[in-house]
């Protein structure tokens, strides 16, 4: 088997052990809820501009800003980076086009 498969298999086993309480010292990353409207406002973008820049629908962005839905996964990570280092994200996005 490939080494990538072995690492995934080991990681899955560790995740299962953690959920069963057998891995009490696991490193768990928890991201707090965010003020997405504030993040968007700080970079001076409209909802349409922000949604377009990050590849999400305006409807999804509106739900996030109202708080009836929350971003998850990669979107949540990107928004956390955007909150802390907006200039770096905007530079990366502008050079990708």
Image (cartoon, grey):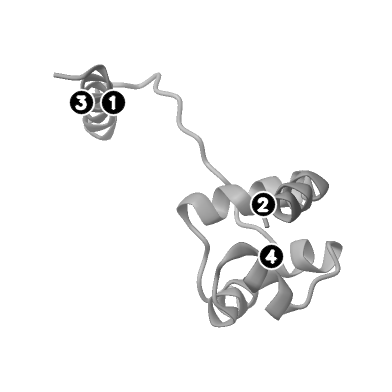
Q: Position of residue 2 (x, y in %)?
A: 20, 19
> Disc 3 marks which residue?
9
Q: Residues within 10 Å of mark 2 (few under 14, many from 20)?
A: few
Question: Is the residue 75 above or below the residue 4 in the image?
Answer: below
Q: CA distance from mark 4 to mark 1?
A: 31 Å
> Disc 1 marks which residue?
11
Quick one: SS at disc 4? Answer: helix
Decide which of 29, 58 is in the foreground and name it.
58
Specify the quadrant that holds the N terminus: top left
Q: Are marks 3 and 1 in contact (CB under 8 Å)?
A: yes
Numbered label attached to residue 96: 2
Specify the quadrant that holds the C terminus: bottom right
Quick one: SS at disc 2? Answer: loop
In the image, is 6 to the left or to the right of 81?
A: left
Single out the mark in the foreground, 4 or 2: 2
Q: CA distance from mark 3 to mark 1?
A: 5 Å
Single out the mark in the foreground, 4 or 3: 3
Q: Are marks 4 and 1 in contact (CB under 8 Å)?
A: no
If you read the primary sequence from the N terminus, does the residue marked by circle 3 or circle 2 appear first? 3
If you read the primary sequence from the N terminus, does the residue marked by circle 4 or circle 1 appear first? 1
> Disc 4 marks which residue?
36
Single out the mark in the foreground, 3 or 2: 2
In the image, is 36 to the left or to the right of 29?
A: right
Q: Residues within 10 Å of mark 4 (few under 14, many from 20)?
A: many
In the image, is 49 to the left or to the right of 52?
A: right
If you read the primary sequence from the N terminus, does the residue marked by circle 1 or circle 2 appear first? 1
Decide which of 18, 46 is in the foreground and name it.
46
């Amino acid at each position: 088997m490939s080494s990538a498969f072995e690492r995934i298999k080991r990681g899955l086993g560790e995740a299962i052990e953690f959920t069963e309480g057998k891995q009490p010292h696991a490193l768990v990353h928890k991201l707090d809820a965010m003020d997405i409207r504030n993040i968007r406002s700080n970079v001076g973008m409209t909802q349409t501009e922000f949604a377009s820049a990050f590849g999400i629908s305006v409807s999804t962005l509106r739900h996030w800003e109202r708080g009836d839905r929350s971003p998850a996964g990669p979107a949540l990570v990107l928004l956390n980076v955007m909150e802390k280092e907006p200039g770096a994200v905007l530079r990366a996005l502008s050079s990708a086009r």
